[in-house]
Image (cartoon, coloured by chain):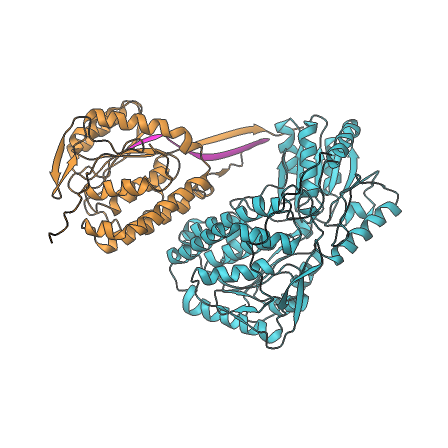
Amino acid sequence: MFEYAPAPESRSVVDLKPSYGLFIDGTFVDPTDGGSFKSVNPASEEVLAEIAEGGGQDVDRAVRAARRAYDEVWGPMPGRDRAKYLFRIARIVQERSRELAVLESLDNGKPIRESRDVDLPLVAAHFFYYAGWADKLEHAGFGPDPRPVGVAAQVIPWNFPLLMLAWKIAPALAAGNTVVLKPAETTPLTALLFAEICQQADLPPGVVNIVTGAGDTGRALVEHPGVDKVAFTGSTDVGRAIARSVAGTRKKVTLELGGKAANIVFDDAPIDQAVEGIVNGIFFNQGHVCCAGSRLLVQENVADRVLESLKRRMAQLRVGDPLDKNTDIGAINSAAQLARIRELSDAGAAEGAERWSPPCELPDRGFWFAPTIFTGVTQAHRIAREEIFGPVLSVLTFRTPAEAVEKANNTPYGLSAGIWTDKGSRILWTADRLRAGVVWANTFNKFDPTSPFGGYKESGYGREGGRHGLEGYLNV
Amino acid sequence: MSERVAVRKTYKLFIGGKFPRSESGRSYLVQDTNVSLASRKDARDAVVAARAAVKGWAGATAYNRGQILYRVAEMLEGRREQFVALGVPTGEVDAAIDRWVWYAGWADKLAQVYGGANPVAGPYFNLSAPEPTGVVAVVAPESPSLLGLVSVIAPAIVTGNTVVVAASPSAPLAAVTLAEVLATSDLPGGVVNILTGRIGETAPTLASHMDVNAIDLTGVTDAELAADLEVKAAENLKRVLRPAPADHDWTADPGITRMTTLLETKTVWHPKGV
């Protein structure tokens, strides 16, 4: 490995407060019946700030504020004016993008290169895209005069905190809804900075409310009777619980849940490109990606070549300080997630798969896990069935295209898949047979605000992004 | 103390991102101002500039075009007073800005509304997507001088076309001021070219120009001239937008026809199979 001098991004662009309240009705307020918790930097375990934990009454207050804003301001407002607010937000995100990127990396542990070059540009683009829909909803294909749903309860995960916020808030506001959003308890900071951005944009009070907290806060929000729409991104288990809890209500629901994506490499694939795609597929964002290519299905006759090349490439990955611009793999987001990754990896070894990681020095403090692959994995192994949500790849082989499809689909999940081959007709043949909501061919982990994202089967329902992403927020 | 003597602005053409005078050295007096009187040669020069800009503009991502068009709206907002001083009513300026924002949002959406997958009866992937037709000649409406102008330029360029616009002969100052907005909005030079002068002089040159792909006759009020221009346009089968009716309401929802008329649809077939 080449020696690199450290190239740390400056923290000075971020102005952290010691504590943060809830953002309700346009202002930051103290919780009435909640407590507080701390958000830490997973790369150092340093406490970043103390965060208010919203209780039931706080959730109620936020939902009422959202309802009032919906009835009196945002619902009646012409689409062209809603558009202008969303364009303002997009512009402010662009203007403050470095501040947001550094804060995201501090709170989440992801490399600054990713927060700066992937998350933030996508966040701004998402607001731009949906801003443009706000005044042309009648062209979106849902009838001549589509109406908003009302108040949306939105609960988002910790892997792409600000991007998931954008995926939730932009289409909701464009369609004329108001929102109460709960960020994940380990990554609330960029959502709170976003609340400041809403103030800076003069967004009317109550249109966006941010209630921080953990699972109980989220449950209170989702189950609140004043909510018309529930949008959740997170684990399949919680998604299932939400689907149960809204049963019998009129709440509209979209769920974007777990995945166990197959990344299929055929023997005619350009190996170097495929290896880059495999690395990107599983090690991007420490593997904290619901659509990560966590199962590599490689055609048997090229498996040795692919693995050799993959190991060589993995040895070049730089694990460490998320704020260093040379870092490829940052910190695992929390101690709890690190424990889960370790538990499943140990199970993989115990069940007989062969474990390999490149030589890799990990920092003493913080939460870290070296990039890891398992070979000799069978479909029965836990590491081939369960979502690890970490930098751990399970390698399986196949002989025929039909076998590849069979194995790829042999999972309760169906979020994404990858196909690597030089033959266009084989890409399309395979894509037709994959039960997955997003299929990447000769690329992986590509996202765009115009492109719908979401899963089949137990990866959830509904789509976010694109024209389709409006449907969950319209009364159609 | 004497009163300060004002510095007056020269109103010129807008070609290839620059502000040249007419090569003919002529001007005409309108709105109390000498305005460049474009020649047939100026029209041809403008087509050359527009053609040169097609590759970069049509090749830019839809997202990028949308960003630039939105930037135009931002710049327009900052010049509201200037348009009002030229006699454009405040309400019209606001409507023109809002219209520009509306079109900016279409950049990355029209393909999703106007293109799509076709379920052909066979093992084929089949996708239709719109593409810009190329260089569009536009005769802008006589009035409203700003809203009318914006309403014909924005739908043509948002999809990746470039335009040569014959501005309103009786109220060209708003057009030249709009050119100054466009020149400071990151819009690549040549995407919009504006000619001031007589429609009867520039429009026939544009209509018969073999390197122009479409012509928008919206602002042609003389039915005989319109028919003649359409005949000329037929030579290389230009796509034609016919003149707007005299009572056309420019404040109404424009719909998407102005955009779709200036598009080609490309359908791609690809077999499916191992």
Q: Is residue A306 left or right of residue B98?
A: right
> For the C terminus of chain B, which image quadrant?
top right
Magenta span includes A37: no
What hue represents chain B? orange
For the record, the magenta segment spans B123-137
Q: Which chain is cyan?
A: A
Q: Residue A453 appears at what percent x and percent y?
A: 59, 47
Q: In the current view of this chain or complex, which residue is farthest to the front?
A: B1
Lateral position of residue B193 relative to residue B159, left or right: left
Q: Which of the two residues, B1 or A33, is positioned nearer the viewer here?
A: B1
Please name the residue shown 44% across and 40% down the image.
B64
Main secondary-structure element of the magenta-colored stretch: strand
Q: Please indicate, yes or no, whether residue B87 appears anywhere in the rendered image.
A: yes
Q: Quadrant of residue B243?
A: top left
Judge by depth and name the residue closer to the eye, B138 or A32.
Answer: A32
Queried whether the magenta region covers residue B127, the answer comes back as yes
What x and y, as percent, mark residue A181?
A: 57, 63
- Please state which of residues B122 and A348 is positioned toward the viewer in this rendering: A348
Image coordinates of residue B270 in percent, x first then y, are 56, 28
